[in-house]
Image: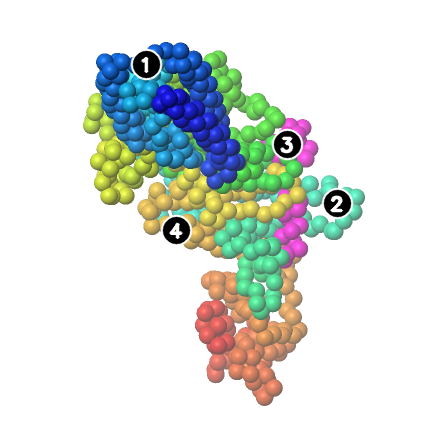
Amino acid sequence: MDSNEDLVNIFEETEDEIELIEEEKEYNVNFFRNPLHILSNDEISEIFLEQDDELLIFEEENNEVNSESSAIGSSTTITDDEEENNKEDSEEEDNEKDNEETEQEDEQEERPRGKGRPRRVRGRGRPKKVRGRGRGEGGRRRGRGRGRGRGRGRGGSEIEQEDNVNESEQEREIGTELPLPPQFERFYHSNPLHKASINLPQTMYLSDESCTPYLIFSLFFTTDILNIIVNNTNEYATFKLSEGGRPWQNLTLSELRIFIAMLIYMGIFKLPSIKDYWQSKYHYPKHNITKFMTCLRFEQIKRYLHISSITDQNNKTLFSKLEPLSTHIKDISQKHYIPSSNVSVDEMIARFSGRSSHTFRIKNKPTPEGYKIFSLCDAGYTYSFIFLSRILKNPIIDQIPNLNYTSCQVYHLIKQLPLHKSFNIYMDNFFSNINLFKFLRDHNYGACGTVRTNSSKFPNSLKVKKKLDWDTLSGVVVDQVLSVLWIDNGPVTMLSTIHEIDNGLQNRIIRERRRPRINNTNSSTVKRVFGDNSKKELPIPKIIDDYNHFMGGVDIADQYRSSYIIQFPARRIWVPLFFWLLDTSIINSYLIYKIKYGKKANHKNFRLSIILDSIKETIKDQQLAKETRSQGKGKKVQKLAEKSYITKNFELLPDRLAEDKHLPVYNDNNLSCEYCKILNKLKKQAAKKSPSKTHFSCSFCNVRLCINNTRNCYHLFHTITDDELNNMKE
């Protein structure tokens, strides 16, 4: 009877177990639907397969119980000796089962938690029950493990124990499979490395006045280039307005200089609309530069500005519309500057969001859409560049065997560097590949840069997907090019022909480093190296340090341009590239100025100096033109006005302060003194006292001024400054 009661208990426990498993399945389904706990498909399928296996196990045990129950009903009673033997076997099995469960619980606690819901021991957090069966007190007990091993005799115990190995130990074992840093014969230059230098005309070395910001900028925008733009603009405007439109007055050289100066000014002092610069309302700032050109004339010039000739048969593509200005700026950039030995190649983007089949769209970039330009730069100086099109190939690019089109463009930029000099080229993973680096080495150029793991010929032994210890360093030599893997916050893969990594500290340099993110694999290493410090001076590979220092040449140029960028909406799709050329010319001029005079120069003041000198040059040209016309006709420069009026917001002419230009002239008629009018207006005496009258005027300023024994308005008018006049107004 005892045996029958045991069988009944076993059947009840089995039914309870099946119900629990079904509840666990339903719980898991609800759990997976919860968006706060997201598991991978592999984890979900693994859990359901385990539950299905468990149901199969119970069905097998039920069949065994049924067969044993029938055997018990027909068998005889158990003897005392057999009962004692069964008790001893049961105790031994219980001890073994307890030891296995303890080991499984320890392994489960050591196992790191994965993503989403933490992994638990079978039973999903419910209290663990010891289930089995026996025959009375001396019955044989067969326990079923509730951990990762499912009982004995199924062959799954050893397999599951292998799965319980610590993941971090497995990942560290991968690091031992990486190849050791190899011996590499790096590339050596025949000439020593050098610093950047300038090669200006001899006249600019005479004095500081002969090498001003405007004169350096005039090397890029010469008078000849400006005259070409003036002629082509007038030709284009006449062609466009032949069918009717607003009358066009031919553009002059002085107007073009003022136009360029205003573009630079608007890049420094930005407003939402171009018309806001000419606003005269009191709540708008006042921009004195607008006195030299009206808003209508500025927009007219911007509308009809043209660089190339409309009759040129080669003027059919987008980039040909920038000739000859583009080629001239490139030639001048290479003529007056010798870059240092460490230069970089990278892409630039000229912002443009209009309709054009030549623009590129690149996500996660500061400028996500615009014209792409490959540039060769040295610490911000743009030495050479290529305009890229999305639909057309550049005909000047020569195709080289075993190199892709992008690599051929890179070499087209590199071969423009000065001869008989040593150069190391740095580039990012968009350009780097083993074939290009091998080609550059064969042509006496060093190269270094990051590389993508899917690049051609990149060794498979360095393609790691799992996390490794911080500061792990490995490398492989392929075609005389060193491939490097270094673990920082993540894996960093690089190529180089000018570095070594097998000499220990000889190829490392002390730099301040930030503590990497802590994960399951690098936590012990990071804590040991950094402790509680967020930054610490540590030795890092020299290849990493050189790349960080010399790769930023193009980025520095972008930073200079972004501070005072010249960018306005335009109807012609090539105009943004003209703005880019203008910005590039200013930045190159500024860096030449810094090399000549040291690092005291300020970028903003440099641009303002170009604006001021452009206006002075324009005024000088206008004065010379007036004198030439007056001498040719034998007449006065301008007929004297019968009357002049001083308004509330009057301002004096800026050229009144020019020296060696003013001469007093006697006139027959007697008119009011201009300076006396100003004084009466400031003192609010217009109604009480009329200004003095005089026969004398200034030949240059064309205004009446007093010269007598009581006052000398002629001298005061030509010496008072704008600041003194503003103080008198206040």
Residue interval drawn in magenta: 294-321
Lower sequence index among marks 1 and 3: 1
Per the model, the C-alpha gap separating discs 4 and 1 is: 107 Å
Quadrant assignment, res 123: top left
Q: What residue is drawn where x is 35% and y is 23%?
A: 2
In percent of width and height, residue 372 lies at 53, 33
**Which mark sits nearer the N-terminus, 2 or 3?**
2
Q: Secondary structure at mark 2?
A: helix
Q: Label 4 sits on what residue type?
A: Asn
Residue 195 visible from this viewpoint: yes
Q: Nearer the viewer, residue 361 or 698?
A: 361
Nearer to us of marks 2 and 3 is 3
Identify whether 259 is placed above or below 198.
below
| Amino acid type at image mark 2 | Leu
Tag 3: Cα neighbours inside 10 Å, few (<14), some, or many (≥20)?
few
Q: Are marks 1 and 3 in contact (CB under 8 Å)?
A: no
SS at badge 4: loop
Residue 144 at x, y = what percent? 35, 22
Q: In whole angstroms, how far apart are the C-alphas of marks 1 and 3?
A: 96 Å
State if disc 3 and disc 4 touch (CB < 8 Å). Answer: no
Q: Residue 560's x, y, as percent?
A: 44, 44
Could you tell whether 185 is left or right of 316 in the image? Answer: left
Labels 4 and 1: the sequence-earlier one: 1
Identify residue for label 2: 241
Kindly identify which residue carries mark 4. 602
The tag earlier along the polypeptide, 2 or 1, is 1
Q: Residue at x 65, y 51 (%)?
A: 299
Q: Which mark is residue 357?
A: 3
**Disc 1: which residue:** 77
